[in-house]
Amino acid sequence: MRNWIKSAGAVVLAGSLLFGGMALSGAGQEPKKAFAAEESTKNTVSVVGKGELSMKPDIVYLNIGADSSAATAQEAQKANAAKMSKVTTLLKNTWGISDKDLQTAEFYVQPNYTYSEKGGQQVKGYNAHHVVQVAYRDLDKVGALLDAVSGAGANNIGSARFAVEDTSAFEAQVIEKAMANADVKAGAIAKAAKRGLGPVLSVSQSVSTDTPVMYEQAKMMAASTAADADTTISTGEVKVTTQLSVVYQLN
């Protein structure tokens, strides 16, 4: 009986040593993997390259609309519809703007409220609001167009967004500028670290839209020195930018 207990004890002890050895062996491998990953990270440099081009815009998007007030919602909407009908007819027939370049941007009819201690909040008439976005390509005549629609009844004229309609001609150029900028930054970092700059390991583009370029909106400058003066518009330049996140190997 004692011999059997001794044997069983030996088996348990041997098993403990065996599993302990396996655990120790496994524990010894994980630091090696972590160390290898850490070393790999130490031998890379990550930078963000920025590319930018400035150019003259060839299209402007204008917000043109009208507001009307009346005692009832129906009367306000009817009055505003008459104004907008006159404005859109002018845009199409006189200025040659097609239906595809006219898009409703804002539309609502809502009550106007007044408040008094005696009566509380009460409806005092209604306001109708309608704005269309107009795409226009003859930028030398933008000021004259705004004067014309204002004379036709448009009393809500918003900002203008200038852009370049076809981006395909310069998308490659702005990407190349971003990559060149990344090369300069990575080279400077490698030199400061007394290392050599190796090949590119990965590149990703940072954009907020579906296209590889982003536009910086130019501001519409409207100047009028007298009541009867013509509106003048300064188109300025449109900046097209993109960003590349680039990872390089360090030698």
Image (cartoon, rainbow, N blue to C red):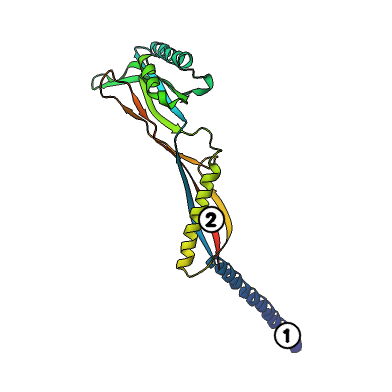
**Quarter of the figure with residue 250:** bottom right
Question: Residue 5: which numbered mark, if any?
Answer: 1
- Given residues 32 and 195, the one toward you in this image is 195
Q: Quadrant of the N terminus?
A: bottom right
Identify residue for label 2: 246
For image coordinates 70% across by 84% down, the residue present is 9
Where residue 244 is drawn, which disc sits there? none
x then y, percent, for residue 123: 33, 17
Residue type, numbered disc 2 = Val
Give the class, few, some or many, for how many residues have Cα within 10 Å of label 2's Cα (few <14, many ≥20): many
The answer to whether 249 is drawn above or below residue 205 in the figure is below
The spot of residue 18 in percent (x, y) is: 69, 79
Which secondary structure, mark 1? helix
Q: Disc 1 residue type? A: Ile
Q: Quadrant of the C terminus?
A: bottom right
- In the displayed structure, does residue 182 sit left or right of residue 140? right
User: Can residue 9 be seen here?
Assistant: yes
- Residue occupying the point 34% across, 12% down: 71
Most extreme residue toward the left, as rendered?
117
Specify which label sits upstream in the sequence, 2 or 1.
1
Q: Distance between the residues labelled 2 and 1?
A: 67 Å
Q: Could you tell me residue 128's position as x and y percent?
A: 39, 18
Q: In this view, does 130 lie above or below 44?
A: above
Does residue 121 appear in this view? no
- Residue positioned 51% across, 53% down in the render: 180
Q: Relative to 120, is 179 above or below? A: below
Percent coordinates x, y for residue 63 in the rendering: 42, 25
Crowd around label 1: few <14 · some 14–19 · many ≥20 (10 Å): few
| Picture quadrant of residue 108 | top left
Residue closer to the observer: 92 or 110: 92
Task: Indicate whether 133 appears above or below 85.
Answer: below
Q: Nearer the viewer, residue 4 or 124?
A: 124
